[in-house]
Image (spheres, helix red, strand yellow):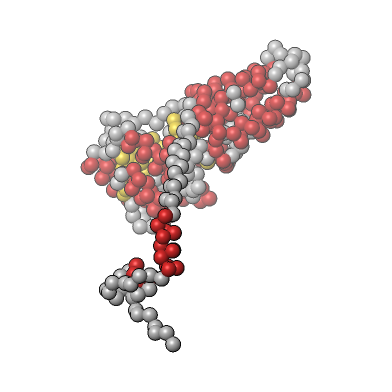
Amino acid sequence: MSEPKEKGKGLFGRLFKGGGASSPAAPEKEQTEEASTAVSPPVAEVPVAAAAPKVEPVKQSWFQRLKSGLGKTSSKLTTGITDLFSKRKLDAETLDDLEDLLIQSDLGLETTSRITAAIGKGRFEKGISAEEVRSILSDEVERVLAPVAKPLVIDPSRKPHVIMMVGVNGTGKTTTIGKLATKFKSEGKSVLLAAGDTFRAAAIDQLKVWGERTGCPVVARDVGGDSSGLAFDALKQAQASGADVLLLDTAGRLQNKQVLMEELEKVTRVLKKLDPSAPHDVVLVLDATTGQNALQQVEVFRDRAGVTGLVMTKLDGTARGGILVAIAAKFGLPVHAIGVGESADDLQPFSAQDFADAIAGT
């Protein structure tokens, strides 16, 4: 019977110097394996291909984003116009069909009449292309919108310039405040935010988040707090700090119009105790997806809250963007800005020409 091998004398013992004693000559098989290992040619390293450079997406211009955002509205119009004016002479029936298309696109009766009159002038029983119709559509829409395209201008002589934001819940009012704060801060202005929608915890929290993002202080109270008292405190703080702009959020509950409007009137009275000229702007935020309902909102808030200008949001999510044209024609209120997306730079000053070209697909 053979004796057992000493501990540490095998291959692993030699490799890891087990047992500390010098090892005797290895068996022939082990020597052959070592020799074979020793003479093996080195394995060539396979070069690792360099990672492809990251291609940043090309940032679209504002007009490209606007055109894309108004794509649903534009597509409805341009497709209908192409169907109507392909190899067909202009007659009363065609104009009636065009009128129906424009009204269904929420452009309103007044603007629709202007467009059909301009197209029909001197062209009866003559051929007219879809491209010509879209060009006339763009021109007439721009004529309606040009007088109301007015930026929201901050008066540097007012410390602060008070902007009261109003509108029903869900229009994007609080988000619009955050985007405006971003814009004003980028212009070097100091901005104070006031969470005056004290009925909704989500609105208060959302404004606090925007305050953190923009570096703007936020005046807020617990849910259910007195909104007029908060407005008073916010204006007092803005005056003491020398802020350039005070952006004041308010509650939006159109289903209880009387209570809402009385509350807004109270906020206005309280602000005037500290500054008789405040608020300097009352901006109504409208959701384009509401279509014809937006007309009623403008009328109610104009009559009771003294609206001085408009911002329209969510134009990228609807085929009803034409409602802005109907609102401009009926009320003539300044349109300060429009929104076509979620990011801060998706809210831009309103351009009548850009909007008209985008909606007409020209």
Q: Is residue 53 visible?
A: yes
Query: Residue at 75% across / 13% down in the picture?
Result: 126
| Quadrant occupied by the N terminus | bottom left
Residue 212 appears at what percent x and percent y?
33, 48
Q: Is residue 65 left or right of residue 292?
A: left
Quadrant of res 292:
top right
Q: Is residue 230 left or right of residue 329?
A: left
Query: Residue at 29% across / 76% down in the picture?
Result: 19
Q: Is residue 251 visible?
A: no
Q: Nearer the viewer, residue 127 or 47?
A: 47
Q: Nearer the viewer, residue 311 or 182?
A: 182
Query: Residue at 28% across / 38% down in the picture?
Result: 190
Quadrant of res 117:
top right
Residue 54 appears at what percent x and percent y?
45, 39
| Residue located farthest toward the top when viewing the structure as drawn | 122
Quadrant of res 5:
bottom left
Q: Is residue 130 left or right of residue 309?
A: right
Query: Residue at 27% across / 74% down in the picture?
Result: 21
| Quadrant occupied by the C terminus | top right
| Residue located farthest toward the left when viewing the structure as drawn | 240
Residue 131 appears at what percent x and percent y?
66, 20
Q: Nearer the viewer, residue 22 or 230?
A: 22
Q: How many labels sit on residues? A: 0
Residue 127 appears at what percent x and percent y?
74, 15
Q: Is residue 179 above or below residue 21?
A: above
